Amino acid sequence: MRDEITDDELDRQKELYVPFTEAVRALVDATIRTEVDDDEVRAVQAEVEALTERLRRRQLAGAYGVRFSSNGRGRPWGNPVVGIRNPAAPPVLVERDPAGKAWASFHLGAAFEGPPGLVHGGVSAMVLDQLLGEATGAGGKPGMTGTLTLRYRRGTPLGDLRAEAWIERSEGIKTWARGHLMDADGVTVEAEGLFILPRWARERTEPENPRYFE
Amino acid sequence: MRDEITDDELDRQKELYVPFTEAVRALVDATIRTEVDDDEVRAVQAEVEALTERLRRRQLAGAYGVRFSSNGRGRPWGNPVVGIRNPAAPPVLVERDPAGKAWASFHLGAAFEGPPGLVHGGVSAMVLDQLLGEATGAGGKPGMTGTLTLRYRRGTPLGDLRAEAWIERSEGIKTWARGHLMDADGVTVEAEGLFILPRWARERTEPENPRYFE
């Protein structure tokens, strides 16, 4: 979807929604970890329900989608990995190089736990899928995930992490990418994937053609 | 971690936390989709911050972990796929068969969107990782994910979905499982994985030995 907003309007929206979403993200963390009395939990629940009702008074009919500004930049703000309007996203803020590289440093807390103290294996897969897709997009070879293979070398501790991805090679609409997740001691999970530009995107013209599809 | 709670206490906790977490989950959805005025967003943000502060007055020092009740049942309530205390989880409520099968029907909304209207490829990977792990655990062959391969046949629409997984074969501490994600029209994503029982778990005794590790 394309909505013709200016860079100023984009900045205004970020200024409004980033701290708001961050506040709800902190509430998600507190919801998992709280040990307050039952009555207090119930009281907070009633207030949360009232707030949700206020937010729903005017809302999108469905999911957020990916909006495109007049400058062609995509805004995947509902995305569960990078979405700055999604309180369930870490969010991972990705840096890119047009040579087909993408990387990010980020923090994963209680909401991303699998085995005690460790990142859920599926969360590692989710983040790496996004990063590999970002690398292919950064290199001008965007695509939807065709296959993805993860190798778990050891458990990934919750906390400060880094992910890196890069294009391995590309043939027509197919692009192969690799990447890994790391903690301070090195690589914990390796990933490789095949990304394919879908037909509906091939038939579109820039700049509406998304940079990536995850 | 083992805490000696009775079945009654377990039921009491579920009765308290399931609707509370569901309320915060709805707030997450509304946060992504709301279009109310800026002033109202800021007003709701201030109230959310106050609620978080109330919940944090007494809270776990870290993440939730996996608690084990006196009956040996695990409570992975913070888990990002199945955690009934995690507002970022769908949650996927898994059914199991001791023959080594696991399946679940669930709904994925705005918080799980990748390409417009479709489930994020990494979310599909995350759910399937969990389901394959549940299948190995159900069959008495729990393990942590060693490798995981996903094949994306077509886009998975947001909405009502189903996932199924089963043990393919097992040799000592290694178990291979397969599974898929489906919409009403059939399979959208296929998965296969190798699960390995980690050393620390091999050295433990039942019932503290977890049923699965994701």
Image: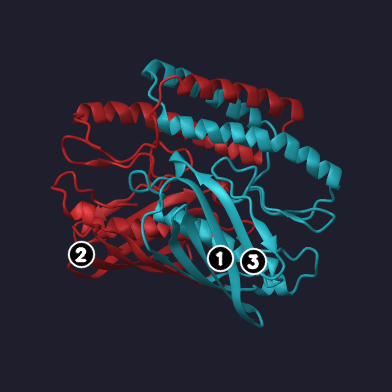
Chain colours: A cyan, B red
Chain letter belonging to callout 2:
B
Q: Secondary structure at mark 1?
A: loop
Horizontally, residue A1 falls left or right of residue A52, namely right
- Identify the disc placed on residue B155: 1
Judging by the rendered image, the residue that carries numbered circle 3 is: A101
Chain letter belonging to callout 3:
A
- Real-space CA distance between mark 3 and mark 2, rounded to the nearest whole angstrom: 37 Å
**Number of marks in the rendered image:** 3
> Is residue A201 depicted above or below B21 in this figure?
below
> Is residue A93 depicted above or below B85 in this figure?
below
- Find residue B179 and report its horizontal and vertical position in percent: 36, 66
- Find residue A62 and report its horizontal and vertical position in percent: 63, 47
Which residue occupies the extreme bottom position in the image?
A171
Mark 1 is surrounded, within 10 Å at the Cα level, by few (under 14), some (14 to 19) or many (20 or more) other residues, namely: some
**Disc 3 residue type (three-letter):** Lys
- Find residue B184 and report its horizontal and vertical position in percent: 47, 61
Are dots 1 and 3 on a single chain?
Answer: no
Mark 2 is surrounded, within 10 Å at the Cα level, by few (under 14), some (14 to 19) or many (20 or more) other residues, namely: some
- Identify the disc placed on residue B173: 2
- Real-space CA distance between mark 1 and mark 2, rounded to the nearest whole angstrom: 34 Å
**Disc 2 residue type (three-letter):** Ile
For the N terminus of chain A, the quadrant is bottom right
Horizontally, residue A72 falls left or right of residue A110, namely right
